[in-house]
Image: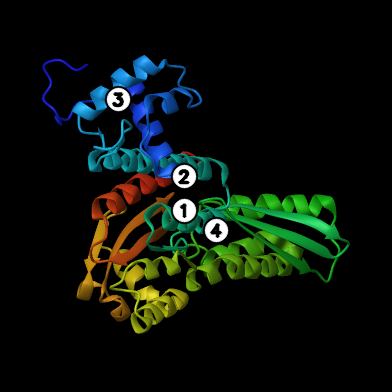
Amino acid sequence: MLTNQKAGENVELDERKKKILQAVIRNYLETGEPVGSRTISKYSGLKLSSATIRNEMSDLEELGYIIQPHTSAGRIPSDKGYRFYVDQIIQEKDSQVNAMQDMMIQRVDRVELLLKQMAQILASNTNYATMVSGPNYHQTKLKFIQLSRVEANKLLIVVVVEGNIIRNSFVTLDEELSNEEILNLNILLNNSLNGLTIQEINLGVIARLKEQAGIHRQVVEFVLNEVSEAIGSQAEDLQIYTSGATNIFKYPELSDTENASKLISTLEQKELLKGLFDESQAPSASDSQIQVYIGDETPVKTMKDCSVVTANYVLGDGLRGTIGIIGPKRMDYEKVVGTLRTLVTQLNETFNKQQ
């Protein structure tokens, strides 16, 4: 029994009391019948006598976690008991999601796949709609170029840029190159282009490359066109990954046919979301700054009944994008902001270590 303890006063439960309380609540949820000490003593994993369980249940009753209906010797959960149980479930779920996030970031090398998975996990974790923009390539530096022979007149071009973004393409040549010639071209291209951004690969750089390539200047020109196409097109074609659109229907203020239809349509149309990402990535926005748009503050008109929380991520010196969470104005801002801060920090630190 408790001593010097007022009934209902909040105290930290020890592990035994937690297990017994969880057993009472789970058993009551399953049967709908008041739970006695003999029932709990049979609960797998407890290995406690009925007398011990009886004493612990008496303490839990004094603390206000369980109550005894007047017609039964068994106990049922109180509101306080239910609150403890729900909070424990939420904490366990959050830990599982955080572990998934850690595993995801550690194991996924390709940025595109990572961002898609991130959108899905955030939607599952928050129960809101999520959107993640692919990295902006305007200041991305080239890390590596590899030319490999596939067939007599066919080359595979592998281009790697910051953030371990990999682009592959095949080119057909008018001439057959020897292994030595391919090796020399690889050395020339990497020595000349590694560490440069797309803007820095200018006419002067290209002219010097062609001059150094000699009789293979046309091959170099062809390869440069492929490099420009592989990377440059990404700068213009902003990728946006969304998930959890159907979570909108969980909130009555957003679930009427007209509002829900507009929101889901917006999440499917990249052009409508670009304004939000452009503002989040404006020069005035810091790298990891959390921005919260409430109602009419959002640049996307169809989201005026929502709140949108965004954060920027940075992968290396040039790769930069935005993560956004969309929900009702009564969203759990504390959890959303905390989740975004943790995820962005993990993302930035993990990829910056690879530089």
Q: Nearer the viewer, residue 265 or 354?
A: 265
Dot 1: what SS?
helix
Residue linked to disc 1: 121
Residue, disc 4 = 112
**Place of residue 202 in the rendered image (x, y in percent of width and height, measured from the top left):** 51, 67
Q: Are marks 2 and 1 in contact (CB under 8 Å)?
A: yes
Q: Earlier in the sequence, mark 4 or mark 3?
A: 3
Q: CA distance from mark 3 to mark 2?
A: 38 Å
- Callout 4–callout 2 Cβ contact below 8 Å: no
Q: Position of residue 120 (x, y in %)?
A: 48, 57
| Badge number at residue 182 | none
Q: Which mark sits nearer the N-terminus, 4 or 2?
A: 2
Q: Nearer the viewer, residue 58 or 288?
A: 58
Residue 282 shows in the view: no
| Residue 225 seen in this snapshot | yes
Residue 201: % across, % down: 52, 63
Q: As shown in the figure, which amino acid type bears the numbered disc 4?
A: Glu
Neighbor class of circle 2 (other Cα within 10 Å; few <14, some 14-19, many 20+) is: some
